[in-house]
Image (cartoon, grey):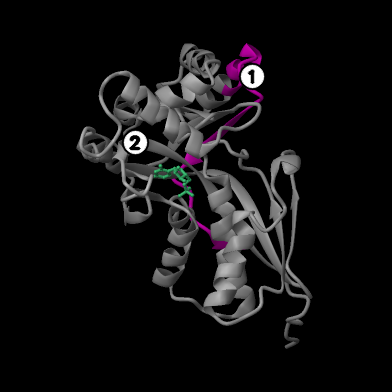
């Protein structure tokens, strides 16, 4: 049998987006992060990250939002390749290509997905065989949401979201994602959350905000695959901050609810809005109504849970 030529072999990894079905945000910690009870669900919108041997590090991207992706050293995928190479005493001689379908700066962990994808693609290409636990630890160094992008499925994230416990799900949940024009910066949204808490006289630090806890009813709804029960418990503490920074999101949330969604919530730090619906037909109808409402750029029906980063 002919062996593949290692100089030209490309490894491609597919990585899912996420929605937070519960995002309970605690007080600001001394290091500036916030402790979370973060229930992640991976959903079927994917980026693909390809790694090909190259003489020097190179990063390219394709897809409708390419102009908004930084293609320099600051890109989380490039940082992931450097981090893995450093751990193994290698030079990051790789061409990474990101085929982007997850909204950029949309609150769906697109940048984190690319980092997780780059780690797995390079680990496979370089034959470094990093144990899964170590890959997860590298992910956590890169960002709070990166370990979940690697893991996929459903999971509870504690700490800043990086300490994961996998969660069982009892069925498929149907969603529509309304993608906004432009993104929101995650640090800006956390800062706005703190500002709103302070303005309400509640305080924003750990002494004044209760420790965030997972909602047992929500975990039960996930376990049972019960969309109506999940809809009743969806919660995102960053939503008031995202809507405060982007007031038009209130119209998007309203348009999806009016179209028959069981529940509407801002996805993570936004501005993508997530609509939980009862079946695929309602997903199609809700997506059409959202588009027709003129309150979003695109509307994408999909399902969750979705598998984590996978070599294809
Ligand atoms: O971990 P990541 O790089 O994704 O975080 C981006 C920013 O979001 C942080 O610098 C911080 O401002 C904010 N953040 C936070 N608490 C978290 C996660 C993120 O305040 N648990």
Magenta extent: 287-312
Task: Read off the residue under disc 1.
Answer: 291
- The picture places residue 149, in percent across and down from the top left corner, at 49, 53
Location of the N terminus (image quadrant)? bottom right
Residue at 37% across, 30% down:
194
Q: Tell me: 119 left or right of 260.
A: right
**Local crowd at mark 2 within 10 Å, few (<14), some, or many (≥20)?**
many
- The picture places residue 55, in percent across and down from the top left corner, at 79, 75
Indicate whether 97 appears above or below 280.
Answer: below
Most extreme residue toward the front is 30
- The picture places residue 261, in percent across and down from the top left corner, at 45, 20
Residue 235 is inside the magenta segment: no
Q: Tell me: 125 left or right of 231.
A: right
Indicate whether 136 appears above or below 6.
Answer: above
Q: Are marks 1 and 2 in contact (CB under 8 Å)?
A: no
Whether residue 267 is visible to the viewer of this picture, yes or no, is no
Give ligand 1's quarter of the image. Answer: top left
- The picture places residue 209, in percent across and down from the top left corner, at 24, 33
Residue at 69% across, 54% down:
98
């Amino acid at each position: 049998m002919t062996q593949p030529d290692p100089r030209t072999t490309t490894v491609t990894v597919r990585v899912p987006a996420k929605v937070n079905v519960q995002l309970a945000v605690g007080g600001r910690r001394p290091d500036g992060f916030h402790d979370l009870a973060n229930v992640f669900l991976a959903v079927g919108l994917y980026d693909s990250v390809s790694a090909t041997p190259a003489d020097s590090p190179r990063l390219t991207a394709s897809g409708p939002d390419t102009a908004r992706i930084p293609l320099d050293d600051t890109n989380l995928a490039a940082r992931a390749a450097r981090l893995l190479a450093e751990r193994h005493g290698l030079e990051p001689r790789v061409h990474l290509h990101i085929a982007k379908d997850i909204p950029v700066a949309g609150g769906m962990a697109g940048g984190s997905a690319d980092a997780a994808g780059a780690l797995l693609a390079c680990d496979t290409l370089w034959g470094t065989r990093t144990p899964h636990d170590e890959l997860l630890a590298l992910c956590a160094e890169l960002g709070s949401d990166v370990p979940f992008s690697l893991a996929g499925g459903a999971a509870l994230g504690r700490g800043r979201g990086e300490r994961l416990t996998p969660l069982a799900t009892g069925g498929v949940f149907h969603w529509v994602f309304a993608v906004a024009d432009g993104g929101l910066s995650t640090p800006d949204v956390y800062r706005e959350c703190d500002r709103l808490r302070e303005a309400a006289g509640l305080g924003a630090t750990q002494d004044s905000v209760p420790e965030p806890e997972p909602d047992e009813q929500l975990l039960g709804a996930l376990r049972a695959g019960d969309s109506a029960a999940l809809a009743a418990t969806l919660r995102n503490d960053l939503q008031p901050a995202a809507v405060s920074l982007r007031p038009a999101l209130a119209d998007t949330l309203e348009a999806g609810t009016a179209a028959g969604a069981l529940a509407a919530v801002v996805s993570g730090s936004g501005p993508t809005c997530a609509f939980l619906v009862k079946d695929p037909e309602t997903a199609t109808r809700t997506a059409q109504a959202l588009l027709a409402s003129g309150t979003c750029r695109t509307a994408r029906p999909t399902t969750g849970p979705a598998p984590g980063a996978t070599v294809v």
